Image (cartoon, rainbow, N blue to C red):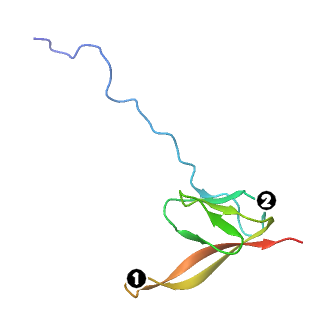
Amino acid sequence: MATTKSAGSTKLGRDSQPQYLGVKLYAGQKANVGQIIIRQRGTRFLPGENMGIGKDDTLFALKTGVVRFSTVKKTGFNGIRRLAKVVHIDPVS
């Protein structure tokens, strides 16, 4: 019987790729059409005026303008009230 394990393939050494989530443009910054504003899992931020949402909940600009954040009161399905964070694009003329 061997007293030490023979040299072979290791069970460690695997690592997943980072997801690069988070806010990409902040309030007051200029956004172009199609530019990603927030990458998120779930709807932590909701799309507002001139904003679109992707199938992975990514928020992106539908018009060129300036990014603005706000909060609104939302009521959930159980009547639970909460403040929801909303992202808007104010168009530039």
Residue 32 position, x and y percent, is: 79, 59
Which residue in the structure is indicated by mark 1?
Answer: 77
Q: Residue at x 52, y 67 (%)?
A: 43
Q: Residue at x 65, y 65 (%)?
A: 52
Which mark is drawn over residue 15? none
Which residue in the structure is indicated by mark 2?
Answer: 32
Q: Residue at x 54, y 58 (%)?
A: 55
Dividing the picture into quadrants, the one containing residue 59 is: bottom right
- Residue extending farthest top: 1
- Image quarter hosting the N terminus: top left
Circle nearer the N terminus (2, 1): 2
Q: Residue at x 40, y 82 (%)?
A: 77
Q: Nearer the viewer, residue 52 or 82?
A: 52
- In the rendered view, does 34 fall on the left or right side of 81? right
Residue 53 position, x and y percent, is: 60, 63
- Residue extending farthest left: 1
- In the rendered view, does 10 fall on the left or right side of 20? left
Q: CA distance from mark 2 to mark 1?
A: 35 Å
Residue 46 position, x and y percent, is: 58, 71
Looking at the rendered structure, the kind of residue marked 1 is Phe
Secondary element under disc 2, as helix, strand or loop, is: loop
Q: Does the residue at mark 2 contact the one at mark 1 (Cβ under 8 Å)?
A: no
Dividing the picture into quadrants, the one containing residue 14 is: top left
Q: Nearer the viewer, residue 61 or 82?
A: 61
Looking at the rendered structure, the kind of residue marked 2 is Asn
